[in-house]
């Protein structure tokens, strides 16, 4: 198990790296995180919803993702409340106060341990990931994710600290000092992450930490920017490019919504050499872009109202009228329509909001969530191997005849349409992951790249290469033999 001194110290990425290492060494690993809080989610092959990080870790392990890998998912709908997804299905929205009541947590811990036990019966080793800090004293009694789960699993546990943020000695020492003896007994080693410079200069630090804590430092991982692994937390958005780069490439502006979900939808496009992708909420930058994308949202009406009140809706419409391309994905697709209505208060107290009016569609939010993986053809093309997934709580109807963006080739009935295509410069879809497909990226960039300047990226092959590079990076800087010894694996 990999736990942390804080959030965003690298737990998810290191967990993915060890999933790949164990797979390379002939084992059958699987990832597990009892509770995830994230707006980045994914649909399993069975049509259930889990955190995107566990889907990425499963990909690194070379297996299909499953709901048992992340039995509890919290999706924030506001600063004070989250939708609770249990075993892949939403069970309601709760405030933080309601969610952390002891009885609710006991039932969720039972569900989490049952999911872990099912997973452990099918895979070995299970690579667990913790959440946030393991020493939050006010929450620890109700914790279902960190050392309570480590004790249930009998997991050899490794504490990760981010040296790049400073204060690594205090954070490691303080974290371990606040543990109960049975909790500290789980900790088999410390991993220092994001080290800049020559790691040999930290040899004294390794020894001092071991002497202070009684726990060995099993690795010092150098900071890297040249290995790409999808990130879990929206905190990662702060590290992504926020401003347009130099001229010469197609400028793609992703509108930075307050409750932006599934920001990994844009990872493949961000790595395409033809595109300069950035996230922004600046009207001038939106106006200067070639392509504007409205992403998914966990609170579509609230984000739509914020766009309207800030003037960004008008800026997007003006950009479209000036000949720019505007695309909407999931909640962004809903916003491009004439209205988004919430008569049953699914998202909140506001019953309806006027959309941008660029597409002749109307959306009514409903309590039942659609979650499923999809295969499709794009714009009726011959390529039938496009893939994506749906996660939404709305039904969108079209006013009059329409050309769909995608024709679904799986499910019942096959041949069902998705989205609305108003032309190459305006369309919307419910399909997350649609931009992972080379045919879609080519079509999106085609109006701005009349001469083909680069081959499309094979994103699946690219990601597999990155997992292998991450595994090699960890092997070179972490005592993997010590971890194998702690696991008693051959």
Image (cartoon, grey):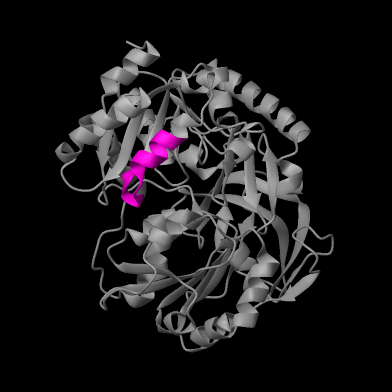
Indicate the quadrant containing the C terminus: top left, top right, bottom left or bottom right.
Answer: top left
On screen, residue 149 versus residue 201, left or right, reads right
The one of 216 and 87 positioned closer to us in this rendering: 216
Q: Nearer the viewer, residue 351 or 396?
A: 351
Region of the chain picked out in magenta, as a range: 162-174
- Looking at the picture, tell me which residue is in the foreground, 412 or 476: 476
- Residue 58 at x, y = what percent? 45, 33
Q: Is residue 450 left or right of residue 172?
A: left
The location of residue 309, given as percent across then percent down, is: 64, 81
For this view, does 223 lie left or right of residue 433?
Answer: left
Q: Residue at x 60, y 58 (%)?
A: 430
Is 351 placed above or below 365 here? Answer: below
Number of numbered discs present?
A: 0
Q: Determine if residue 382 is in view.
A: no
Magenta highlight: main SS: helix
Q: Position of residue 364 (x, y in %)?
A: 76, 64
- Above-or-below relation of 212 to 89: above
* 170 magenta-colored: yes
Is 175 in front, or is 157?
175
């Amino acid at each position: 198990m990999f736990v942390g001194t804080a959030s965003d110290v690298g737990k998810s990425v290191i967990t993915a790296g060890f999933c790949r290492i164990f797979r390379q060494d002939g084992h059958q690993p699987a990832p597990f995180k009892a509770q995830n809080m994230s707006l980045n989610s994914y649909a399993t092959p069975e049509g259930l919803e889990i955190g995107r990080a566990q889907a990425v870790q499963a990909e690194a392990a070379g297996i299909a993702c499953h709901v048992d890998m992340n039995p509890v998912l919290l999706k924030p709908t506001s600063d004070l409340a989250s939708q609770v997804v249990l075993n892949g299905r939403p069970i309601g929205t709760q405030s933080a106060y309601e969610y952390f009541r002891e009885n609710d947590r006991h039932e969720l811990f039972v569900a989490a341990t049952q999911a872990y036990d099912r997973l452990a019966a099918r895979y070995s080793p299970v690579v667990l990931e913790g959440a946030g800090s393991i020493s939050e004293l006010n929450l620890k009694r109700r914790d279902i994710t960190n050392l309570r789960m480590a004790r249930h699993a009998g997991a050899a546990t490794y504490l990760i600290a981010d040296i790049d943020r400073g204060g690594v000695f205090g954070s490691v020492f303080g974290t371990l000092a606040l543990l109960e003896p049975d909790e500290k007994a789980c900790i088999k080693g410390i991993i220092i992450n994001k080290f800049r410079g020559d790691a040999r200069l930290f040899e004294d630090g390794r020894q001092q930490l071991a002497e202070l804590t009684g726990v060995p430092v099993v690795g010092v991982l150098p900071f890297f920017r040249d290995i790409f692994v999808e990130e879990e937390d929206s905190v990662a958005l702060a590290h992504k490019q926020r401003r347009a780069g130099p001229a010469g490439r197609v400028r793609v502006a992703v509108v930075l919504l307050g409750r932006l979900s599934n920001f990994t939808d844009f990872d493949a496009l961000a790595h395409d050499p033809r595109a300069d992708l950035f996230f922004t909420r600046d009207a001038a930058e939106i106006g200067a872009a070639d392509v504007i994308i409205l992403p998914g949202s966990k609170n579509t009406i609230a984000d739509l109202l914020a766009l309207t009140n800030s003037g960004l809706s008008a800026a997007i419409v003006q950009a479209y009228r000036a000949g720019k391309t505007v695309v909407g994905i999931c909640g962004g697709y809903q916003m491009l329509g004439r209205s988004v209505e919430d008569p049953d208060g699914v998202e909140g107290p506001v019953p309806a909001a006027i959309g941008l009016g660029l597409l002749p569609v109307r959306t009514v939010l409903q309590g039942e969530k659609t979650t499923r993986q999809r295969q499709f053809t794009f714009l009726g093309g011959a390529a039938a191997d496009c893939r994506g997934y749906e996660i939404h709580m709305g039904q969108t109807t079209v006013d009059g005849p329409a050309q769909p963006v995608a024709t679904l080739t799986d499910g019942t009935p096959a041949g069902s349409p998705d989205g609305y295509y108003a032309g190459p410069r305006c369309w919307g879809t419910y399909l997350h992951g649609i931009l992972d497909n080379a045919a879609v990226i080519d079509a999106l960039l085609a109006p701005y790249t009349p001469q083909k300047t680069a081959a499309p990226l094979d994103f699946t092959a690219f990601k597999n290469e990155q997992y292998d590079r991450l595994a090699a990076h960890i092997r070179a800087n972490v005592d993997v033999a010590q971890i194998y010894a702690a696991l008693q694996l051959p």
